[in-house]
Image (cartoon, rainbow, N blue to C red):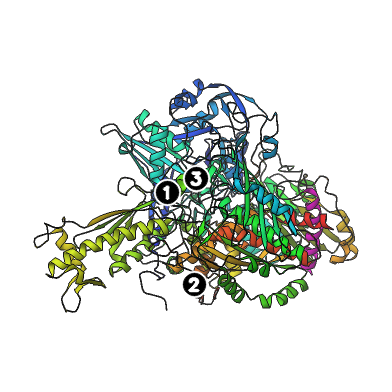
Amino acid sequence: MYAFDIERPTTLADAVKLLAASDENQALGGGQTLIPTLKQRLAMPEVLVSLTAIDEIKGISEDDEGRLCIGAATTHAEVAAGAGKYPALAALAGNIGDPAVRNRGTIGGSLANNDPSACYPAAALGSGAIIVTNTREIAADDYFEGMFATVLDEGEIITEVKFPVPEKAAYMKFEQPASRFALVGAFVAKYADGVRVAVTGASEEGVFRWSEAEAALGSNFSPDAIERLSLSGDGMISDLHGSGEYRAHLVGVMTKRAVAAAG
Amino acid sequence: MPQVNMTVNGKPASGDVEGRTLLVEFLRETLDLTGTHVGCDTSQCGACVVHVDGKAVKACTMFAAEADGAEVLTIEGVAAPDGTLDPVQEAFHQHHGLQCGFCTPGMVMSAKALLAENPTPTEAEVRDYLEGNICRCTGYHNIVKAIMAASGQDVSKIAAE
Amino acid sequence: MPKDGGIGASSKRREDARFLTGTGNYTDDINLHGQAYVHFLRSDVAHGKINGIDTSGAEAMPGVIRIFTGKDFESAGSIPCGWQVTDRFGEPMKEPRHPILAEGKVRHVGDPIAAIVAETREQARDAAEAIELDIEDLPAVIDMKAALEDGSTKVHDDLSDNLCFDWGFVEENKQAVDDAIKSAAHVTTLELINNRLVPNAMEPRVAVGDFNRGTGEHTLYTTSQNPHVIRLLMGAFVLNIPEHKLRVVAPDVGGGFGSKIYHYAEEAFCTYAARELNRPVKWTCSRSEAFLSDAQARDHVTKIELALDADNNFTAVRTETYANMGAYLSTFAPSIPTWLHGTLMAGNYKTPLIYVNVKAVFTNTVPVDAYRGAGRPEATYQLERVIDKAARELGLDPIALRRQNFVTEFPYATPVAVEYDSGDFHRLMDKLESRADFNGFAARRAASEKNGKLRGLGINCFIEACGIAPSHLVGQLGARAGLYESATVRVNATGGITVMTGSHSHGQGHETVFPQVVADMIGIDESMIEIEHGDTANTPMGMGTYGSRSIAVGGSAMVRATEKIINKARKIAAHLMEASEADIELKDGQFSVAGTDKSVAWGDVTLAAYVPHNYPLEEIEPGLEETAFYDPNNFTYPAGAYACEVEVDPDTGKVTIERFTTADDFGNVINPMIVDGQVHGGLVQGIGQALLENCSYDADGQLLSASYMDYAMPRADDVPFFSVDHSNGTACTHNPLGVKGCGEAGAIGSSPTVVNAVVDALQSGGIKLDHVDMPVTPGRVWQAIQSAK
């Protein structure tokens, strides 16, 4: 790693100030992706501003609209244990990485990084979540901008994610056998006003909504509804672990299984 | 360089660290607690698992500065002060749950964390929990068996001939 | 009944006490006063001409002590190859120079170009980034067949082409084999790839060099399976240091699996630099660096043909293999696809005619060498896959076809130069059939099908040549070393024993198992015996641990030395009891005079040896310490029969291992618990090869699976509990313990078992395909299903 300093502010205001101090300063969530990146010397921050000591952006609560509100510095393990109101989300969090990773990794860190194979982006997009930052609220539909890219500005910190709780939902992940990230993950959520299907791991554009499946499931929420749908392998990630065509196929399989699991 | 202070295996420990100093480097190089190992640099192998404030974490994927003020337990602190092995350590010994010993500290620390969360895990739960701990020697058979035995389950029927 | 101790007892491991409490002593735990750190600047291109290396800016960086490049080592020897293969035409293999640091060209991604020694690791790494390299990209040679085409770019400009050797075995049989195949009633042909692997011992390599100016002694602490071999190769061939001025220490070593046999450039560098700089120099490999610098494994492209007569007897086997050597010859690389592969092509069968052709090829990839099994997995895989295919083509039961062709008379001289001393393949298969519950398979398959899954059953038999030794044999085959083993048994005055072995444990449990043997021979408690290994300063010259040789060769040396001890102790006892030596009996640690009630205890005799007041000084010397070197007259031949049941999810292509049953013949077994553990570990390495692990390069020679993010290591949830058996082995006929070795069996036997099962599962689903290349990943299975539709 290149040399840098670490600051551990205890308030959001201090964290914002520290990040604003220099373009070279960078936020550190749980570090489960950033630290390996730093080891490869692929990033050169001046100061890492650790967000893990800021109590005001931790914890799980419910707002007046019944949304599940999760502080950005809440770990995957805490979400797995504490998001009982949204079981599909709790289950997703409880399957990210491995137990030690789940004890450090945070929802804010995952969403800010937007790894194309990460699980949380599928949950956020599949739930129509609101991503709250220190300056604004962003609808998930407007938040993701392709692999490792989001609409976050320099120095902008995710503080909370608000999840509308669906009638039913499930996430199905087909793991890439080495990294155990999603080779393909499908998050399906049924709300009173329609069904959302978000897919991670598959597309070169990062997480996306599968609108044909949403439409089909909107009128018939059953695995059969998507039996005849198919996706093209064009634009899907193709690598050592599977072709784009294979990934496109898996999107259908995982979506079907998610619908079945949602009940 | 800033100083960090933490409790390691029940004793106060402090030292100067750089921002980039990993917890595992602080343990191995500053405190000379070399039982915690480094087997990869992508946070997958789990040879470096320690407990920070009671939770299993990968000491290679956490900065020492972030453990300031924390309670840290490493493999060196698991057995009783008189040398009596912890039940997990004892079960690994009885069931040959280790060969070269390199992944063992992380395996033991993960197993202890599992049993703290889930006192009588099924085989599937044990295997699932070990997703972040790679062993190249044992084929996992005797590790899984040892952890189930440590939980008090009868493992005499496992893979019975 | 389980025994309490000694041979046959599942004694618990004494190594565990330190490994379970974090008090082991691995090489990276060693820090010497005043040590500096080295970082290797490695090539990021697979093939390039070095036009310039400007280190001036880097040398001025903070903490930098010195920067070395290839020029500093022009007078040093080449990293040596320990085995010379002679080709079909009687010519020696091509053997290019393998420099410590690149000279003129880089030949694979990871080839070290410069070594930066600095006060800290990070300073060394910072300085590496400041080195200005002028490297002209050259086309990379990656595909073996393309590498052999006329006009291909050459990996080594001073060689005529990229062919290391073209080996034929047995060359004299070639015409007869060709004729037999031509006239056969049936010929089954299979083309397959034995995928390249990365051994991935969990402990990355480490080297710490030290030098004492006062004595001129060099010390190298290194992660090695064979410290004496490193001392010999590095001292005599690379750095020109006499062995008495060079000590090599391999302390606790965190797994090897072959990858820590070889002498590596980093070891020579640290030893040399410590002397040059007069301070210790330490290198700790990161996992990412290990993917580019540890020898890799397997990587064969093979076509095999099996000929059968009208009665389904095997009449001939012909194989053609392209074996990847990588960019340089690693220590034992040429022996793997030849003598450890061709000699096993008979398998468990009495095929009368066999011809093996191997073309070893240089490519711009990391060097390839032995990995658990080494050559024997490649032999077993192709043979057992083609037999499975033949059974399907002929509509025969795969077990019956194998049984019909089993070797049944021992000793059996194969047509490929080895003689199996003992075995009983039918009994192994009987045991497998009874233990694997084949009768219940149909019901289990039906249950799987109900859940939308395809279930397959795979069978496999194998035999391996282990206890890698006979010096006279391996010498004829091209080995440049002897392959004996050594032991010194030092009995202390108070009766305790230290055994110093040239063998080395990096997980096998020598410290537990070796004392069991000595304890049994003398009749004392195991706790009275301690094992020393891994330090050339206090162990006799030995060849180390690989090829399942520790107990068969090292254990036998220890037996011989202990016999010498007992003989001498018997003389002392006879003197003490004023009896004839011929009447002395040793039982339970007591020497007694036959037919009398006279006896002396072991401790009385050992004390007399060191306090020789009443002692036959005119007949024997005082003291009780003996050394033996053991060189057997044959390999050992463990064999096995394995069964695996898999489920295939046709929607995703995912394969899961549902059941795995083994029946092994390891000869006599010293510690069944440890043998079980060795089999478990080997099985998962073979399953890893079959389903998960894939060391893959792109056309430019960039490694695609360069970390655990892309190289899939088997995890706990990839495998089930195993049912393993090794009871009633047939004893090895030529070593004193009757042991055969168990370290590699699992890795040799499991990959073909798994792939046979996968093909069976797919066939049961109406998917008519004969083969899927390893690793049988979900993507590949799915693709295969689509193609077959």
Q: Is residue C305 left or right of residue C100?
A: right
Q: Is residue A3 above or below residue B42?
A: above
Q: Is residue A28 above or below residue A191?
A: above
Image coordinates for residue A51, horizontal then vertical, percent: 59, 47
Q: Nearer the viewer, mark 2 or mark 1?
A: 1
Q: Chain of mark 3?
A: C
Q: In this view, which residue lies farthest toward the left?
A: C613
The span picked out in magenta is: A236-263
Give me the residue at 79% from left, 66% from top.
Answer: C765
Q: CA distance from mark 1 to mark 3?
A: 10 Å
Count of picture labels: 3
Q: CA distance from mark 2 to mark 1?
A: 30 Å
Q: What's under tag 3, amino acid-wise?
A: Leu
Image coordinates for residue C451, horizontal then vertical, percent: 76, 71
Q: Chain of mark 2?
A: C
Whether residue C497 is in magenta: the answer is no
Q: Are marks 1 and 3 on the same chain?
A: yes
2 and 1 marks in contact (CB < 8 Å)? no
Quadrant placement of the C terminus of chain B:
bottom right
Give me the residue at 25% from left, 63% from top.
Answer: C566
Tag 3 residue:
C477
Q: Earlier in the sequence, mark 3 or mark 2?
A: 3
Q: Is residue C511 left or right of residue C784?
A: left
Quarter of the image for residue C719 reads: bottom right
Tag 2 residue:
C727
Tag 1 residue:
C471
